[in-house]
Amino acid sequence: MNNLQQDVERLIAEQTTSWETARRNYAALRRIRSKTLSFDAFSVGVQFNPERVRSTTARVEAPEERPCFLCPENRPAEQRAVRWEGYELLVNPYPIFARHLTLPAREHTPQRLTGRVHDMVQLAGELPGFVLTFNGARSGASAPDHFHFQAVGRGVLPAEAELPAWPETTEIFRDEHVSVCGIDHYLRPAIRIWGSEGQAVARAGEEVLVCLKQATSCKSKETDDDEAQVNALCWKEAQEYILVLFPRTAHRPAEYYATGTEQFLLSPGAIDMAGVLITVRPEDYERANEETITALLGQVVPDAAQWETMKEFLKRCLTENLK
Ligand SMILES: [Zn+2]
């Protein structure tokens, strides 16, 4: 085990025993309700996790109106950190999984992946026991004003097993260092980037962000941000780095903002895109089935026609930018 992974294992052991909030919430995970929805070639888990209500209902529209919970001066006194480069690795006190970290930048700086894909890939290499995740500022992040990754233990996200072997793909780019393909017929379109050289994978990831921004700049109301809205996953499997980007078209489905029985509190982020949907009210958990989830996710990701256009654009753009 390398040093960073070892330090993180120690941090998890320490925080989940001596920090009462973390100890209680990690212990409660063992009693959490969950179910599996079966689609033709993949499955989606649904978790009922009321402690996540802070994240699901975060008022991302006006982050400046609350103290930033990722800045060191506002964190709980018991929360310890492991430092790595410009980041701090923290145990997430409101976990979704038994191993769940938050990795804020040390500076209070916006949630923008551009320029940080290399960090994500490098962290995935240094933490082989984890999948790194990223939520765009308007794609599920609860702190859009303070940059952060999250990380969850390997082996809990369906996408991690499903995507490397997914049979329905469209080749987007390939050279001797890196491959890029589109993942089709997966409920939420995805872009898989992989190769054995972290640098090449990171560079391709940065270029995909540039091309996605160009591809979506005139087509969505939510692109006043300066990068395309995405969720991302990154992990290292044997000698290969795998980076997955999920393009997004909306932050939350219309049902999120509805009232009464029409309301469904689902605020999808990378974990949801990776195949584990987080519900925070019992009524939403009960109503989550193949039909409702297809309709809800369909509102926040490109539709079939948009996806075809996006892939064609990416093929041209990446070939131009990566040659
Ligand atoms: Zn902050």
Image (spheres, helix red, strand yellow):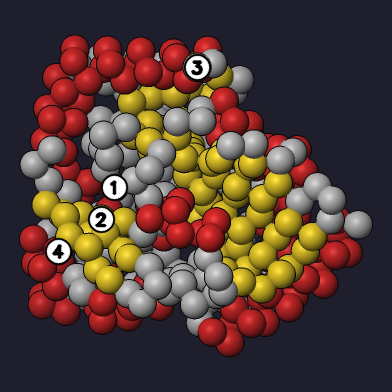
Residue farthest along the right direction in this orientation: 323
Q: Amino acid at mark 3?
A: Met
Q: Amino acid at mark 2?
A: Ile
Label 1 or label 2, whichever lies nearer to me, is: 2
Name the residue carrying label 4. Answer: 285
Residue at 36% x, 77% y is 40
Q: Quadrant of residue 262?
A: bottom left
Instruction: State how far apart marks 1 and 3 are (Cα).
Output: 32 Å
Towards the viewer: 211 or 74: 211
Would you call the spot at circle 4 few (<14 residues within 10 Å), some (14-19), or many (20 or more)?
Answer: many
Residue at 41% x, 19% y is 8
> In this image, 129 relative to 265: left or right?
right
> In this image, 24 relative to 101: left or right?
left
Location of residue 49 in the rendering, given as x and y in whole percent from the top left corner: 17, 49
Name the residue carrying label 3. Answer: 1
At mark 4, the secondary structure is: helix
Q: Amino acid at mark 4?
A: Tyr
At mark 1, the secondary structure is: helix
Mark 4 or mark 1: which comes first in sequence? 1
Residue 194 in sight from this viewpoint? yes
Residue 105 in sight from this viewpoint? no
Residue at 27% x, 40% y is 97
Q: Check contact, mark 1 vs mark 2: CB within 8 A.
A: yes
Q: Amino acid at mark 1?
A: Ser
